[in-house]
Amino acid sequence: MSLLNRKPVVGIIMGSDSDLKVMQDAAVVLEEFDIAFELTVVSAHRTPLRMVEYAQQAAGRGLKVIIAGAGGAAHLPGMVAAVTTLPVIGVPVKSSNSIDGWDSILSILQMPNGVPVATVALNAAKNAGLLAAQIVGSFDEHVSKKMQDYKTAMNDAVLEKAGKLAN
Ligand code: RP5
């Protein structure tokens, strides 16, 4: 069945459409792994009620994991994690007025005990997509198999480069 006809199992959200140039990397990975996803803007500060509603309804709508990206005072991943029981992957985005991205990193990473956010590196939406795929792969054999193939291909590519260097 085409991706478009399936209910999304991953939600990709971001604080602003200006985050899309980074966050689209997560979407590319999910497409590669044949995982149905949705993508939208939800701002913790500019649309707080929409954020709470999104987080409250996510599990009931069938989502299994949320990828949340934001920059600056990046409260979106943590606040969504505070509301939902789904795993939340946080992507610190280096926004244009950032303090070298440390503002985004620390405000997503330094969560209090009891409310975890799986935080990836700065702008690392690709890894967020892969982590989401691994979570989906824990209950979906098709995705699990694709992840095994992905890892094998990565391993082989490194070995091939290593072999060329050695010659
Ligand atoms: C954050 O502020 C967004 O996640 C974005 O990274 C940053 C800048 O947003 P814009 O002013 O470009 O909309 O909330």
Image (cartoon, grey):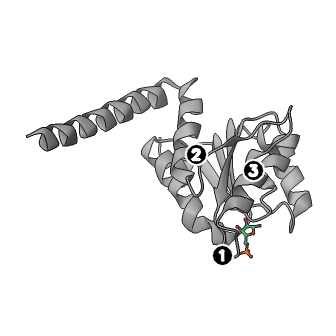
Position of the C terminus, as image quadrant, is top left
What percent of the width, then of the height, locates residue 35?
52, 41
Give the CA separation, mark 3 to mark 2: 13 Å
Residue drawn 25% across the image and 40% down it: 157
> Which structural element holds mark 3?
helix
- Is tag 1's residue or tag 2's residue first in the polypeptide sequence? 1
Front one among 85 and 140: 85
Q: Where is mark 2, residue-wise?
A: 128
**Ligand 1 closer than 8 Å to the CB at disc 1?**
yes
Residue at 45% x, 28% y is 142
Mark 2 lies within 8 Å of ligand 1 (Cβ measured): no
Circle 2 sits in a helix, a strand or a loop, which is it?
A: helix
Report ligand 1 position as a quadrant: bottom right
Q: Which mark is residue 96?
A: 1
Q: Residue 14, can we see it?
A: no
**Residue that label 3 marks:** 108
Gap between marks 3 and 1, in whole Å? 17 Å
Quadrant location of residue 117? Answer: top right
